Image (tube, coloured by chain):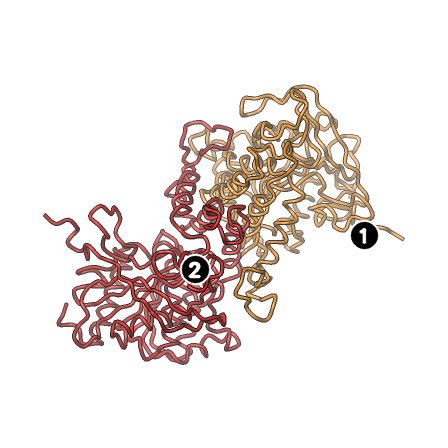
Chain colours: A red, B orange
Amino acid sequence: MPEFPSDSVGLVTPQTAHFDDPLALACGRTLPAYDLVYETYGTLNAERTNAILICHALSGHHHAAGFHSTDERKPGWWDAHIGPGKSIDTDRFFVVSVNNLGGCHGSTGPTSENPETGRQWGPDFPIMTVGDWVHSQARLADRLGIERFAAVIGGSLGGMQVLQWTLSYPERIAHAGVIAATPKLSAQNIAFNEVARQAIRSDPDFHDGWYADHGTAPRRGLKLARMVGHITYLSEDAMGSKFGRDLRTTDLNFGFDVEFQVESYLRYQGDTFSTSFDANTYLLMTKALDYFDPAAPHDGDLARALAPAACPFLVVSFTTDWRFPPPRSKELVNALVRADKSVSYVNIDSSHGHDAFLMPEPRYQAVFAAFMNRVAGDLGLEGQS
Amino acid sequence: MPEFPSDSVGLVTPQTAHFDDPLALACGRTLPAYDLVYETYGTLNAERTNAILICHALSGHHHAAGFHSTDERKPGWWDAHIGPGKSIDTDRFFVVSVNNLGGCHGSTGPTSENPETGRQWGPDFPIMTVGDWVHSQARLADRLGIERFAAVIGGSLGGMQVLQWTLSYPERIAHAGVIAATPKLSAQNIAFNEVARQAIRSDPDFHDGWYADHGTAPRRGLKLARMVGHITYLSEDAMGSKFGRDLRTTDLNFGFDVEFQVESYLRYQGDTFSTSFDANTYLLMTKALDYFDPAAPHDGDLARALAPAACPFLVVSFTTDWRFPPPRSKELVNALVRADKSVSYVNIDSSHGHDAFLMPEPRYQAVFAAFMNRVAGDLGLEGQS
């Protein structure tokens, strides 16, 4: 009797790679040594040409597919797309998924020990950029003997890492999958991030980031940050059809207990997140989003910024995504066209807003599968399918 | 030398009306006695037919036009539309603007003394509904000897009060101006209100609403609530063109001080508001928004709910308003048409988002002025212009 679904990668075990060579960061500081925690699914072929790198979003991590135990209720965050016979077919690809530096799921970050002080890095952990992450991911590739990824793929903040890969290491990426992303944040995106940061930093339990020393955590602030985030992840339509104005009780209570379903949902999401995620990590991740702007050093000319890119792109957006809406993807597509790059663009009809990139929308899966078939074909991997 | 612009109503003095007859509220409780603070501009004619009632929005108040002193830097919140020769022409209309019950600008609210206890009402102040406000406004009209308003006009939450007037007192309103409003909130609207409430209520200085007894106020929470609110008042475009990603300093600081203009703007708006507005009032106002749903007692059939309405409507929306976007106004317009009411609808091209209803957009002013001319014409007030 199988313990897991037949199209699941099944039981997976995270691995840790330790790096002792210092990593110079965009902020000017250097990380003397660090760990990267990652998972792999499938088998690296003898030619080492079938590796796919998965980049995660704001609150993501390395656990993209399969299960950590038979008790785990939910599989990894991109399990809908990674597995035997799925879009990212682990029968032919070797998939690598890494927790980014600054994270709170095993890779070196604010909750790790600072070797210089012997206590947690906390707020002293350097602010990371998308570029820093890509450099650290390239070192992990070195460690795994992967000279060139068949594809680097990611959604949202993950898509920004993919874009950065095509600019920082054009010779090491054969295909780029940029999903539900944007070449830079809008003022409104930054504004929402700023509310999240203010919520965390103004929580009296934040203690300037040294909350661990005080045996506490800014849970109220992190809860609020997550509630605001959730509103931006769902489309207005999705919220409407999910909750409408349904009351939890038949009558209004004329008080401040939960009355509408959407209140209950948001409070629950916020509470859960606030006990499982590190606040300093959340702050760092929002800054990495705000800072991403590859066109900035080129006077805002994105096409010029894209000059180094050498691989074909798939760009995907979702109709009801109002966090990074289709026009932001089109901006990238137009710049790629102006820069004379190879790009396919698909705007997927979905009611799920930004979160659609995580979901098994049939047309999205078909587009994704076709792209991965092209990746396999370009690299002569067909026979392995 | 004139102290004020020639099209200003000039120096105005708020007045207070005290009511000793108890007001029964939707929540089932009764307000034993209360004050309403209000301002008037222009002169009530002998026939008492030229009175206009202005209803305010979430954080509004009675000071809609003119100046409280020669030192006041900014005039009332709707000064762009109220004054001699302006859309709401005080040379022919008598304008009444009232601070709603539960407010914090002079009318009885959470910061007033509870006669039963001798201390501030605080969180014990009853939760008000749009219907309660309309009843209290009708009593003020009685006091002023106004049997029927030539028009009741308001934007946002103010527009909901106008709509309620047409249902609660159809014989007392000759024209309705419903601007940038909605017949009920969406799940997303409620979600944003819930984040604001959680921000205030989870602030350790909230003390279950008894912050005044502790000599403090939940300023961090109120600041966050206002920051979230501001994002929803501005269009993405307006934010983009106002701030773009402009940095305050030339270089990124890789820290959490202000780096982007939009951060500075939001922090400033939040700080200012948090020292000038009462948190319990803010909570009440968001609840009044959430609860407004005149179609609810009619199985959600808005056209059926609108049956009592007897006056012509002007409905105005703004193209970039994403808080109460044009489709929400169209919902109201369609229901009015189905209910066989007289309605004019205009969707104004504006880049200012929800805040556009406060601004002197030329086409908006022209539409507004034409509507007020119709009001004057219908009531035979032409000669006074």
Q: Are marks 2 and 1 on the same chain?
A: no
Residue A143 percent across, percent down from the top left? 28, 72
Q: Secondary structure at mark 2?
A: loop
Q: Secondary structure at mark 1?
A: loop
Left or right: B161 in relation to B68:
left
Gap in angstroms between the C-alphas marked 2 and 1? 67 Å
Whether A83 is drawn above or below A161: the answer is: above
Q: Nearer the viewer, residue B177 or A370?
A: A370
Q: Which mark is residue A277?
A: none
Give the residue type that dot 2 points to. Answer: Gly
Q: Chain of mark 2?
A: A
Residue A85 percent across, percent down from the top left? 17, 60
Left or right: A191 in relation to A179:
right
Residue to which mark 2 is pinned: A118
Left or right: B98 in relation to B301:
right
Q: Nearer the viewer, residue B36 or B385?
A: B36
Residue to which mark 1 is pinned: B5
Q: Nearer the viewer, residue B324 or B121?
A: B121
Residue B224 percent across, percent down from the top left? 56, 47
